[in-house]
Image (cartoon, grey):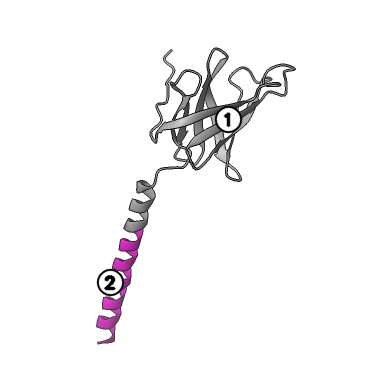
Amino acid sequence: MKCKYFTIIGIAILSLGMIWGIANYLNAKSEPDRYEGAYNSYDINEPNLQIQKNEDGTYLIQIGIYRLLQLDKCIGTVLEDKIVFSTTEWGEDKEITGTITVDDEDIATVTLEATWSDWWFKNINVYKYYKVSDVPDIYELQY
């Protein structure tokens, strides 16, 4: 008789656990990531910032600044309510670092720095973009 009750209680606990797990999975999938998406540049009103969350929790970031530069391989992580990223796609000795913050109105502020240069990003290093989609359009290089 005791085994019967323990079996019923065990099945009930297992069922509640499965329901809780499914609910958490669906809830996590229904809320978009705060940073992930496509952002338009104010300069040319076209998507020039793409942020994609990777399965490992890092972000792939592609940044375009009209007539100045294009970075396609930035990798970042969230630290203190901002994404901190870097890339060495211009060369191992030419690391470009930066941060991205997104405010409540989905305006992304990108700050760039290149410590190896006396002029890159010294006078103007802050760029703003506005979100147009929760789904990024990552450009894949074709060789």
Q: Is residue 77 left or right of residue 118?
A: left
Corner quadrant of residue 115? top right
In-front residue for pair 1/141:
141
- 24 is higher (above) or lower (below) than 96: below
Q: Residue furthest right?
A: 118
Q: Amino acid at mark 2?
A: Ile
Q: Residue at x 33, y 52 (%)?
A: 26
Q: What's the CA distance linking mark 2 and mark 1?
A: 51 Å
Corner quadrant of residue 21? bottom left
Q: What residue is shown with label 2? A: 11
Q: Amino acid at mark 1?
A: Val
Residue 100 in the image: x percent, y percent?
57, 34
Which part of the image, by quadrant, shows the N terminus? bottom left
In-front residue for pair 50/77:
50
- Per the rendered image, the range of residues in magenta is 1-22
Q: What residue is shown with label 1? A: 110
Q: Is residue 93 left or right of residue 71?
A: right
Give the SS element for disc 2.
Answer: helix
Q: Residue at x 38, y 33 (%)?
A: 135
Residue 141 in the image: x percent, y percent?
44, 17
Tell me the chief SS of the magenta region.
helix
- 92 is higher (above) or lower (below) than 85: above
